Amino acid sequence: MRSTNVLRQFEAGVDQPRSSFVSLARKSLDTLNLWLRRADDRRRLREMSPYMHRDIGVDWVQAEREAGKPFWRS
């Protein structure tokens, strides 16, 4: 019975690096996806007409401030 517990602990330790790599890769891809969406949203915001800004409830100054942010800032 004791050897089974040691084997389980060893197997759990083997899976640990793989799961942490997968977790890191997933977080990295999620961050990259977020940055790409922000960059695209800000580009589109800059291209909108004043009528569109009013339609979404944002004035020109707010739109320019948001569009001027770098993609990594929320």
Image (cartoon, helix red, strand yellow):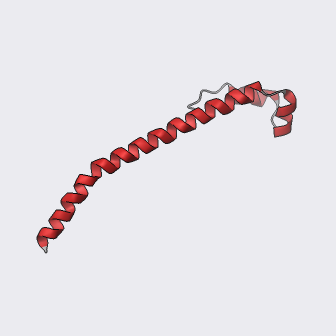
Task: Classify residue 57 by image quadrant.
Answer: top right
Q: Position of residue 3 (x, y in %)?
A: 12, 68
Question: Is 64 situated left or right of 36 in this image?
Answer: right
> Does 10 appear above or below 5?
above
Task: Classify residue 43 by image quadrant.
Answer: top right
Q: Position of residue 20 (x, y in %)?
A: 34, 48
> Does 55 appear above or below 8?
above
In the image, farthest residue toward the bottom = 1
Q: Position of residue 50 (x, y in %)?
A: 85, 28
Residue occupying the point 45% across, 39% down: 28
Residue occupying the point 85% across, 38% down: 55
Please identify the quadrant where the C terminus is shown.
Answer: top right
Task: Classify residue 54 by image quadrant.
Answer: top right
Q: Is residue 62 visible?
A: yes
Residue occupying the point 50% across, 42% down: 30
Question: Is 5 situated left or right of 59 in this image?
Answer: left
Question: Is 37 situated left or right of 66 in this image?
Answer: left
Q: Is residue 74 visible?
A: no
> Does 24 appear above or below 72?
below
Which of 1/58 is in front?
A: 1
All told, the count of numbered labels is 0
Please identify the quadrant where the N terminus is shown.
Answer: bottom left
> Does 24 appear above or below 14?
above
